[in-house]
Structure formats: structure tokens, C-alpha cells
Amino acid sequence: MYSKSTVIATALVALFCAACAGMLPWHDEPVATEVNAAFTIENNLLFLSTLRIENRTGRFFFASAAAHSVIDSGFAAAIGPRRAYELDLGQKEAIRFTPVVLGLGGTGDAILGADVFGNRAISIDYRAGLLTYQKEGIHPEGMALFRYSGDPAITIAVDGRNVPAIVDTASPDTVVLPRANPGRGTARVNVAGSDFGSVDVGYANIPRARIGNRLLSRFLVTIDYGQHVIGLWRDPRTAAR
């Protein structure tokens, strides 16, 4: 059961989104068939607070670059054995998906990956706290567009050098760059024409760079999994951050 404060917060998110609709790049376009899901940001991860799996609420966070969703073994045991699960998005929209069952160690009850959305598109409005499931594709107007193959990725500039970076909402960091010796450092980072100056970045023994929520949150982010296109729109509501 949702608490009174949760209901009020969700209503305020919806009102805020409506008030800001005129600021979005496609505000003059006809509304596409889409479903909105509210999220909260905890430890710089996106927890989809209004969704249900098999009619159960839980702590489900979105991992944009994960090919397969994961359900915590304890959460799965409480539901009972089954191969496929139903994710209720609300607004009479549900998706069947087949996750991997693993122990998540208290991080959350489920990691929702790209397989949930199939060949559809999603948009992430960090400022309004909404993830939009777009069944008719993306609205590219006013966006910087990037085409990708494999993992969803864009090209960013790091110290003046173009670097392919996976768009990873399961990363709470700014940018994590490949390096044999893990650690922290600073680098000048430019994303979709926005120069963020000297930024605190991470280094890890990984094959490709990853851009996480600390920088993605400055944009409205759209990923079209079917067309393999990512759109970024610099959100003026985050200019002071």
C-alpha cells in the first residue's frame, strides 16, 4: 500500500511535468502513444517507484545498458516459481519478460534492463522523475542524435579526444574510463556539445567507457532500442546544477 506522502509526491511529479511540457523539444507535436512511470533517485540510481511485478511492489531500478533483467532470488521466491513475469507499468499497460534470477544482496528487488522494452523507445526526464515508455518511437526534434550497435552508446569528448561511452543508468558516477589501474581523477568532458569543464571521473579495468547518472541527469535522455538511436537534449532546468 502506498503511503499518503508517496501519493502526494507522485501527484506533484505529474503536475510538475505538465507545467514543464512547453519546455520540452517536442511540445508542439501530437502526443504519441506512451506510458509514464515515476521514479525516485536513491544513491544516484533510478528506482521505478510506481511499477509492480506480478502485482507486487518493490525496489526496481533501471539499467539502460543491461541486456537482461534480473530479479532478486528472495523476491522471486516470494512470488513463486515461474519462467516469465508480468511487469505492470500502470495505465493498463503490462509487459511480459523473462529475467535471470540472482541474489542482489539488498541492492534492490529487481534490475530492469533493455529486454523489458524490446524494440520500443524510452525517455528519461530526470528533473520531473519520469520514465516514458514510447511505443511509437522517439521525438528527435532539438536533440543531439547518436546511432549505436551493441550496447546503447554515444560519443563524448574527454580531454579533447572522442570516446565512445555506454549510456549506463546503473552507474551512479559521471564517467568511468578504461584504465588498468582503478582510481579517480579529473578530465575535461564535453557531452552533446555541452562543455562541463573539469569533471571528477572514475577509472576502472573495463573495455569501454561508461557515462552515468551524474552527467546524464543534465539531459533529457531518449533511447530507441529498436532503431538503435540515442537522443540527448540539454535540459535548461538543470543549467544551474
Image: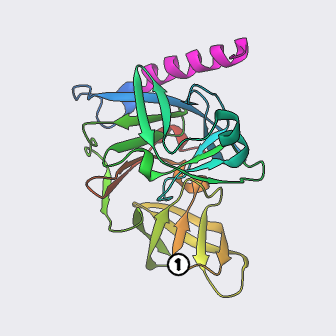
Residue 190 placement (x, y as % from top left): 48, 66
Q: Amino acid at mark 1?
A: Asp
Classified by dominant secondary structure, the portion drawn in magenta counts as: helix
Residue 178 placement (x, y as % from top left): 58, 80
Residue 12 drawn in magenta: yes
Between 203 and 37, the one nearer to me in the picture: 37
Q: Quadrant of the N terminus?
A: top right
Residue 89 drawn in magenta: no
Residue 85 placement (x, y as % from top left): 51, 38
Q: Is residue 205 left or right of residue 74?
A: left
Please, what secondary structure does the residue beneath circle 1 have?
loop
Quadrant of residue 82 within the rendered picture: top right
| Residue drawn 25% across the image and 43% down it | 141
Total of numbered circles in the picture? 1
Q: Residues within 10 Å of mark 1 (few under 14, many from 20)?
A: some
Between 125 and 109, the one nearer to me in the picture: 109
Which residues fall within the magenta stretch? 1-20
In the picture of the structure, the residue carrying the numbered disc 1 is 159
Q: Is residue 230 left or right of residue 161?
A: left
Furthest toward the front, the residue is 81
Residue 7 placement (x, y as % from top left): 64, 15
Q: Is residue 207 above or below residue 11?
A: below
**Colour scheme of this structure image?**
rainbow
Q: Is residue 78 above or below residue 181?
A: above
